[in-house]
Image (cartoon, rainbow, N blue to C red):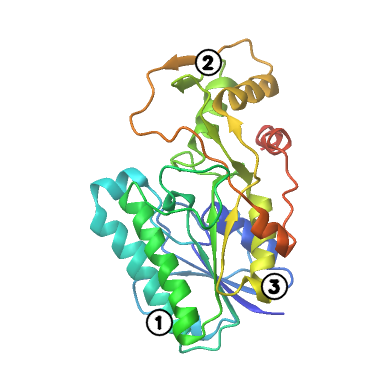
Amino acid sequence: MQRVLITGGLGQVGSYLVDHLHEDNEVTVLDNYSSTTREMLPEDVPVIKADIREDVSEYVQDADVIIHTAAQISVVRSMNEPLFDAQNNIMGTLNLLEEARHADIERFVYFSSAATYGNPVELPIPETHTQEPLSPYGASKLAGEKYCLMYNKAYGLPTTCIRPFNIYSPRQDPSNPYSGVISKFMDKVSGGTVPIIFGDGEQTRDFIHVQDVVDLVDLMISKKAAIGNVFNAATGKATTINELAEIIIELFEKDVKPDHKEPIAGDIKHSVADISKAEKLGFAPKESLRKGLEQFLEK
């Protein structure tokens, strides 16, 4: 049994990690309650209301494993408030890392983002792809990633980084820009109204179910080869927005057709990950998009 500290444990990914890990480990959640509440977590899991930018030494000292999912995740807010974004995503991460290097930490798992890549110049996108973020959010997540890798090299802290693509689940926050399209389509189609697609709908994304992300985190914690490395969290399968809309319309059995609007300026046309590096660790995504979306109907 390990003592696991999960930052951002009230969020989408964090809450699923709590569900998965709490039965066999001593799990503690650290969260500032900025976007959700405690109700979705098991009652026996302690939740500490705290900010990762503040003094978190006592919580870090009590942990064997730190899974750092807490972040400012809004690209729009990062564009409007880049200093706020950096304070949370860079300084918050650095604060945790600095405390962790003075503790007996067995693994520090950092959640980065596919936003660190910017516009893809090769597909599928490998971890070695150039990183040219298009927003302060992408830049701050990249900075956190670089700090994690540096702390491994300079101080021997056993860090590993995950770059998630488009995570989705029935618990997802509709305001999350990476899974928001699913929430918006679900909301529109379930009510019998027309889903809106910006552009021709042939733009592609790599949607990964949160349970597959949880499986990858298991490998990040257990595999020594994960230390000092970065891994894409995705399925390696490209889905067009048109295909996504078609699946959702079929699931709800509605007689509607998408309404195409003008494309969004600067929207990335194609995005799909190369997951061969994670596969070498034993990663194998299990949830098909259709099967994963069916869970939304069971809520």
Whole-angstrom CA distance, mark 2 to mark 1, is 49 Å
- Residue type at mark 2 is Pro
Q: Is residue 71 left or right of residue 65?
A: left
Q: Is residue 51 visible to the viewer in this orientation of the structure?
A: no
Q: Nearer the viewer, mark 1 or mark 3?
A: 3
Residue at the spot of label 2: 258
Q: Is residue 260 above or below residue 295?
A: above
Q: Position of residue 33 (x, y in %)?
A: 43, 59
Q: Is residue 107 above or below residue 161?
A: below
Dot 2 alpha-carbon crowd within 10 angstroms: few under 14, some 14 to 19, many 20 or more: some
Q: Is residue 47 left or right of residue 290?
A: left
N-term-proximal mark, 2 vs 1: 1
Whole-angstrom CA distance, mark 3 to mark 2, is 44 Å
Residue at the spot of label 1: 98
Q: Is residue 104 visible to the viewer in this orientation of the structure?
A: yes
Q: Secondary structure at mark 2?
A: loop
Q: Is residue 180 left or right of residue 88?
A: right
Q: Are marks 2 and 1 in contact (CB under 8 Å)?
A: no
N-term-proximal mark, 1 vs 3: 1
Where residue 223 is drawn, which disc sits there? 3
